[in-house]
Image: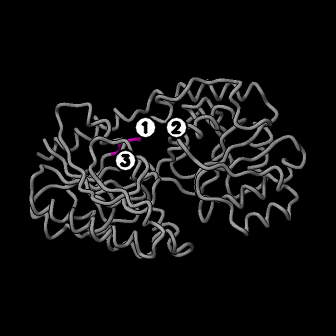
Amino acid sequence: MKVLFDHQSFTGLPYGGVSRYFFELMRSFTKRSDIDFELSLRLSNNEYLDQASFSNHFRYHGLAQIRNAHRVASVLNRLYSLQRVRAGKFDVFHPTYYHRYFLKAIDKKPFVLTFHDATSERFGKEYPEVGEGLYDLKKQLLRRADCIISVSEFSKQDLLRYFPIDPDKVKVIHLGTRLSDSMPLFDPQARPFPAPYLLYVGKRGLYKNFNGFFRAVQPILHRYPDLHLICTGGGSFTHEEQTLFYASRLNEQVHYRPITDAGLMNLYQHARAFVFPSLNEGFGLPVLEAFSGGCPVVLSNRSSLPEVGADAALYFDPEHDDSIAEAIERIVTDDALCVELRQKGTQRLQLFSCDKTAQQTLEVYQSMC
């Protein structure tokens, strides 16, 4: 069996949850003899692919700052992917995002579409940046797809809520993480920061609810001046964020750290807790990453997060400051709770793995041939 993956999620940004999902899927497939695959990609600065033997793309780091460089790369990649689709040398096609460029060329070949979340449907009017206007495009692709993979039961229910899709066409396959692979074991002497800290990972704008979280946690940071907040991923602090930190007199307790896999694991391993105040997640991969680092997890009680975290996390209502503050106060002051959450997180993690995701995905492919 041969599967064709396309370029979409690997063009442009060097990191991202969608590209990581497809990278880990392909990485698992390289260890198997019952599946062959091709990634139709020519130009990419994706960091996950840097050491991948299964991709023969060219990097364009030196040109990335030129205006429209990513757009040009995307067009060239799309033309190449279209060529590979037309060649038809595959059994199943699995596009890595929602562009419909291939629909006319694919003819009767089966294709699988992964549905990550309904963020653009839920928040498109409030936050047009998340993809307002994607609905008709998604609807067309979902209708034509032979099978749809949803990364959580929550995302499946959202999919069925917003799109006229037969439920039997949708298969829920949870994600996994390999962040701890090849990372050094926990070393209490290798602390990335000299004081206790809460850890925030990823983008901070829009529905990610960082501003609401920071507003709620300010009194606690003032009450415990030795406690810090470290943010990683999502880009450096904006001028507006820095102004907010100074205005709240907490600029010396809030820090940004650039992201690498090794550095991220080290941050998880030594954090007092990982906090995820998002209003909407299709899955919430950082939850598994925190589990793999032995980090206590404090989560919003919305969307897929309770499905992933189950009883291995402490929850709060992300739209009520008192609820957020109460949860943070507990995790800061209750050592026994931290120990309990670390243990439960380690146990919970055993239910998820990238190889399990790959096996279940392969079964979907096989059902179509």
Q: Gap between marks 3 and 2, in whole Å?
A: 21 Å
Contact, CB < 8 Å: mark 3 with mark 1?
A: no
Image quadrant for the N terminus?
A: top left
Please provide percent x and percent y for residue 320.
Answer: 73, 56
26 displayed left or right of 334: left
Q: Gap between marks 3 and 1, in whole Å?
A: 18 Å
Graded by Cα atoms within 10 Å as few (under 14), some (14 to 19) or many (20 or more), the crowding at tag 3 reads many
Q: Which residues are magenta?
A: 172-177
Helix, strand or loop status at disc 1: loop
Residue on which disc 2 sits: 288
Q: Amino acid at mark 1?
A: Gly
Task: Give the quadrant of residue 116.
Answer: bottom left
Contact, CB < 8 Å: mark 2 with mark 1?
A: yes
In this view, the residue in front, 326 or 295, is: 295
40 displayed left or right of 316: left
Residue 86 covered by magenta stretch: no
Graded by Cα atoms within 10 Å as few (under 14), some (14 to 19) or many (20 or more), the crowding at tag 1 reads many
Residue on which disc 3 sits: 49
Which of labels 3 and 2 is toward the front? 3
Residue drawn at x 27%, y 57% is 41
Q: Amino acid at mark 3?
A: Leu
118 displayed left or right of 321: left
Residue drawn at x 45%, y 34% is 178
